[in-house]
Amino acid sequence: MIIGTPFASNSTKLMLLGAGELGKEVAIEAVRLGLEVIAVDRYKNAPAMHVAQRSHVINMLDYQQLEKLIRMENPSYILPEIEAIATDALVQLESEGFNICPSAKAVSYTMDRKGIRRLAAEELGVRTSNYRFASSMEECISSIDEIGTPCIVKPIMSSSGKGQVFVKDKKNLEEVWSKSIAEGRGMRNEVIVESLIDFDYEITLLTVRHSGGVDFCRPIGHVQENGDYRGSWQPQVMSKDSYNEACRIAGLITQELGGWGIFGVELFVKGDQVWFSEVSPRPHDTGLVTLISQRYSQFELHVKAILGVDLKLYFQGSDDLIGASNPILGYGDGNRITYEGVSQLLSLENVGLRIFGKPNVAKKRRLAVVLATGESVKSALNLSHEAAKKLKLHVE
């Protein structure tokens, strides 16, 4: 692999399709290695646009807009970072020689809960929750009857818990369908109805496919609220058997998806039993903790894997720490956001902070993350929560 000079005729271009906080960290790592980063999103001044050399604002669900931009820029690497993308355009472009990272198959399958669930459960025989798909209100209600309550209804395409509805009983099921569809992404009116799993804890197993093979980061424990992550820690303690099963499932699924890069594999664990939930073919929001808990963050591993680096040596040694992340939400409506107490927060020992630089808030939005290390997971989590109290957000 050869890396050229940014802005020169021989530049090596990396295009981010989605320029949020995760894309921002990817852009930083790519710029450090001399790549020319092009950040693309549906709105101006997205976080990754602050550090990328160039940016574009388009509707990435529009096949023609997306195809036209990619052909015009002709990037060496194309990294989809969000779900709302015209994946059929990426499949076509890959067939013509464009490098979709990790692969067009991985992107198209995982951007659609229907594709990845059927791959895992029906083709690979991986343990999952019971589920049904529904493309109308009547089918949704019928699926809830079959699965039973309580259950979960999610749009086929969404992120950060958008459109996820916990169904406690069979009242007001028409509203369940309407809410899930209204908050989903993409153009399809379809949901997945899932049974609840009685799990002890859930993890993200960051799985790294690279030129030297497949490696796994230490498991990340996390908590969610309405499908959106509210905190994570690394490592999550697991039994040897459950860890081995988690690695087996993650390896099996990511091998089928193909390509090089980070995959965030979400799993439920009860005792030694493991269920597959979802997978993202890119850095994961719960993996923000790796900015403080790992010598090489998920973002550095992702970029280097894509570039063809053999990462075996990166997983040797004992430099990793016990860490925790605490995402900070902003509430209100406005495009002037002020962060107060930053110096006091950063004066604490073993604490870190990332402010994403998002341009506005509409009701509620993740705006920053507090990071901390400790002698134990409990102490790291406690420190992250105490540090977060020092940060005051004002939205106007």
Image (tube, rainbow, N blue to C red):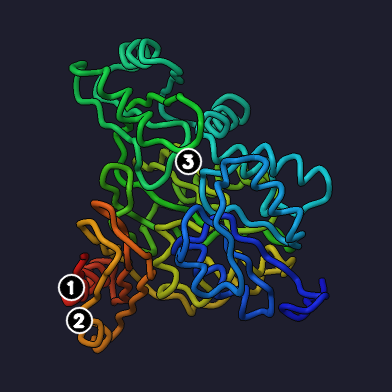
Secondary element under disc 1, as helix, strand or loop, is strand
> Amino acid type of disc 3?
Glu
Quarter placement of the C terminus: bottom left
Write down the residue under mark 1. Answer: 392
Q: Is 318 on the left-hand or right-hand side of 221? A: right
Whether residue 214 can be seen here:
no
**Badge 2 density bin: few <14, some 14–19, many ≥20, Cα 10 Å:** some
Q: Is 345 on the left-hand or right-hand side of 25? A: left
12 relative to 364, above or below: below
Q: Earlier in the sequence, mark 3 or mark 1?
A: 3
Q: Residue 332's image quarter?
A: bottom left
Secondary element under disc 2, as helix, strand or loop, is loop
**Badge 3 density bin: few <14, some 14–19, many ≥20, Cα 10 Å:** some
Secondary element under disc 3, as helix, strand or loop, is strand
| Residue in the foreground of this view, choosing between 217 and 75 | 75
Write down the residue under mark 3. Answer: 278
x, y percentage for residue 54? 61, 70
- Labels 2 & 1 near each other (Cβ < 8 A): yes
- Labels 2 & 3 near each other (Cβ < 8 A): no
Q: Residues under labels 2 and 1: Cα distance?
A: 6 Å
Identify the residue at image location x=20%, y=79%: 340
| Residue in the foreground of this view, choosing between 308 and 218 | 308
> Amino acid type of disc 1?
Lys
Q: Residues under labels 2 and 3: Cα distance?
A: 36 Å
Q: Residues under labels 3 and 1: Cα distance?
A: 33 Å
**Badge 1 density bin: few <14, some 14–19, many ≥20, Cα 10 Å:** few
> Amino acid type of disc 2?
Gly
Identify the residue at image location x=19%, y=69%: 394
Quarter placement of the N terminus: bottom right
Q: Is 72 on the left-hand or right-hand side of 56? A: right
